[in-house]
Amino acid sequence: MIANDCHCHFFSPRFLKALAREKGIDSEDDGEEVAGLLGWDNPGSTGILADRWQQELDRNQVGRAALIASFPGDEESVAAAIARHPDRFVGFFMVDPTQPDTSERVSRALSELQLRCACLFPGMHRYDLSGEATRQLFEIAASHPGSAVFVHCGVLTVGARKKLGLPSRFDLRLSNPIHLHRIAGEYPELPLIIPHFGAGMFREALMLADLCPNVFLDTSSSNGWIKYFPGLTLTQVYAQALEVVGPERLLFGTDSSFFPRGWNRPVWEVQTAALEALGLDSSAQEQIFWKNFERLFPNLPEGREVR
């Protein structure tokens, strides 16, 4: 196996139906029309999509992958995929902590549904990371050993929404990693994952990770945010991240999402090339591509939670 992947989106039938509703497409539509507009394969069913992801991991020699339920309320889709292939998938789920049922939903996801990581998108859902709603979520996650919290900081664009002509009324002001400093320090045993090296707030993400040893950086996507830093390359990004946090707190990911593209192997190839250019030894590369994921999200005995 070449890697574990800490960042894959599970674009379930429920996800497509949610987009269809926003687009004003008949609520009885099974996602076929939206999939056609996006140029995606219709997932068909949660079970079929889970099986396709498992086959895609096999085809690309990927060991395990984090699957992210990509809109609030879709936890059960990812839970069903995990139940189908528990040795291959780890469940992440998007949550909006400002919603009234957040506490109950997160508690159930991390216990009954055996998901492992709550994903926050403060710029998308427009809330203050230092507020009480975020604190309550961290408290719940910390009470479930083996869980983590993922916070999308920096620039955020959602390609599917843009292609469908749907508005993305996000607020970049709410996406600064620095806003996590206090709460990360208050829950030092709770792993906190910042994707895409901070997605344009690279300096701030490094500052947070330097001060808080429970902060991990996920390397996923094309990292197009580099365009905001003239002359910066992915190799240099890796070099600086390694200098600040070392290989022990970098988590490889691709940001893979839809079919027919499937697992985004070119991201792995580019990142492998960047680390080879740095002359990083095989042991350190193994930590980034494999071992750190296993350390944070070890396989659970069937039917049991981490305690």
Image (cartoon, helix red, strand yellow):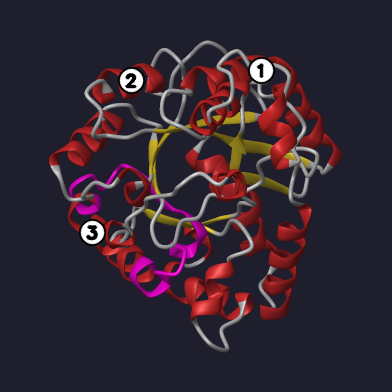
Instruction: Please give the residue where the numbered disc 1 appears in the rendered image.
Output: 30
Residue closer to the observer: 264 or 61: 264
**In the image, farthest residue toward the bottom:** 231
Within 10 Å of disc 3 (Cα), the crowding (few <14, some 14-19, many 20+) is some
Instruction: Please give the residue where the numbered disc 3 appears in the rendered image.
Output: 179
* Residue 10 located left or right of residue 177: right
Figure quadrant of residue 11: top right
Q: Which mark is residue 105?
A: 2
Q: Is residue 235 above or below residue 136?
A: below
Highlighted magenta segment, given as a residue range: 184-205
Q: Secondary structure at mark 1?
A: loop
| Whether label 3 touches label 1, CB < 8 Å | no
- What is the x, y in percent for residue 132? 13, 40
Earlier in the chain: of badge 2 and badge 1, it is 1
- What is the x, y in percent for residue 115? 46, 25
**In the image, farthest residue toward the left:** 132
Q: Is residue 203 magenta?
A: yes
- What is the x, y in percent for residue 225? 52, 70
* Residue 30 located left or right of residue 78: right
Earlier in the chain: of badge 3 and badge 2, it is 2
- What is the x, y in percent for residue 237? 54, 75
Q: Is residue 300 visible?
A: no
Of the two numbered discs 2 and 1 in the rendering, the one whose residue sits closer to the viewer: 1
Residue closer to the observer: 21 or 260: 21
In three-dimensional space, the C-alpha distance between marks 3 and 1, rounded to whole angstroms, equals 40 Å
Figure quadrant of residue 94: top left
Three-letter residue code for mark 2: Arg
In three-dimensional space, the C-alpha distance between marks 2 and 1, rounded to whole angstroms, equals 25 Å
Three-letter residue code for mark 3: His
